[in-house]
Image (cartoon, rainbow, N blue to C red):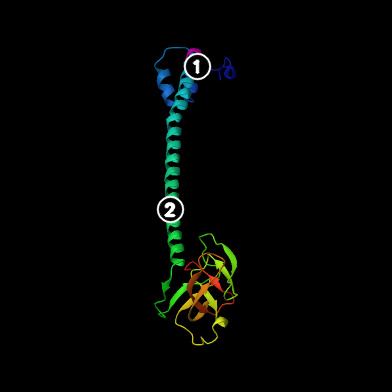
Amino acid sequence: MKALAGDTVGEPLLKSLWLGRIPNNTQTILNALKEDLAGLASVADKINDLAKHSNINSVTPETSDNRLAQLEKQVAQLTTLVGELTTTMRQSRSQSRNRNRPFKNRQSGKLNRRSSTGLGHDRQINRIMLADKVSKLKFLVDTGADVSVLPKYYAPKADSSNELLLLAANDTKIATFGKKRLTLDLNLRPNFTWSFIIANVNQPIIGLDF
């Protein structure tokens, strides 16, 4: 500013113009000094440097507070998420237990069971074919079936439908026609005697009730 003014403007006027362009807090300090314009400019530079350093230091706590607030928010979100997952897992296990449990149909009064075809979504299902030496029937041993069944053709005289219904994995209702007791020789020791449900199925099945 002094170089631009040259000799046409006196120092008091330059000082007044210059002070009007600097921050108020710096003006207050410089007005108390009896330095020439060059000395006041040097003091103003030092004040400006100190102010910048102070501003940098003041940002650090604020930044730390922001990071802490963000961490607290993330922890709260994770806690909520874990709680929701825990609740979902408990509900899923409860629903799985209910699906594999015989239940009473209150509307029809009929006992429904999950049948032998592909039951058991939450457990490992194993299947194997075994031949009975006595009846010559080939039984499907199915760990996914809750009950043991015989096809209706094995008991042709059982014509009347029974109140007991079987429920397939696809929710199809399967009619039953009573029970038939068999002694099986599956090449295992000893032989097994069991009551099979006669149902409208194509394959003799040995289920988990055996």
The type of residue carrying mark 2 is Thr
Mark 1 or 2, closer to the camera: 2
Please name whichever residue, 8 or 206, is drawn nearer the observer in this view of the structure.
206
The type of residue carrying mark 1 is Ala
Tag 2 residue: 86
Q: On the rendered image, what quadrant is the N terminus found in?
A: top right
Tag 2 secondary structure:
helix
- Tell me which numbered mark, 1 or 2, is placed earlier along the sequence: 1
* Tag of residue 169: none
Please say if 23 is above or below 6: below
Please say if 144 is above or below 46: below
Magenta-colored span: 38-42
Q: Is residue 30 visible?
A: yes
The x, y position of residue 159, in whole percent, is 51, 87
Q: Main secondary structure of the magenta part?
A: helix
Tag 1 residue: 41
Q: CA distance from mark 1 to mark 2?
A: 68 Å
The residue at the point 44 percent across, 63 percent down is 97
The x, y position of residue 3, in whole percent, is 59, 17
Please name whichever residue, 14 or 58, is drawn nearer the observer in this view of the structure.
58
The residue at the point 56 percent across, 81 percent down is 154
The x, y position of residue 201, in whole percent, is 56, 77
The residue at the point 41 percent across, 24 percent down is 25
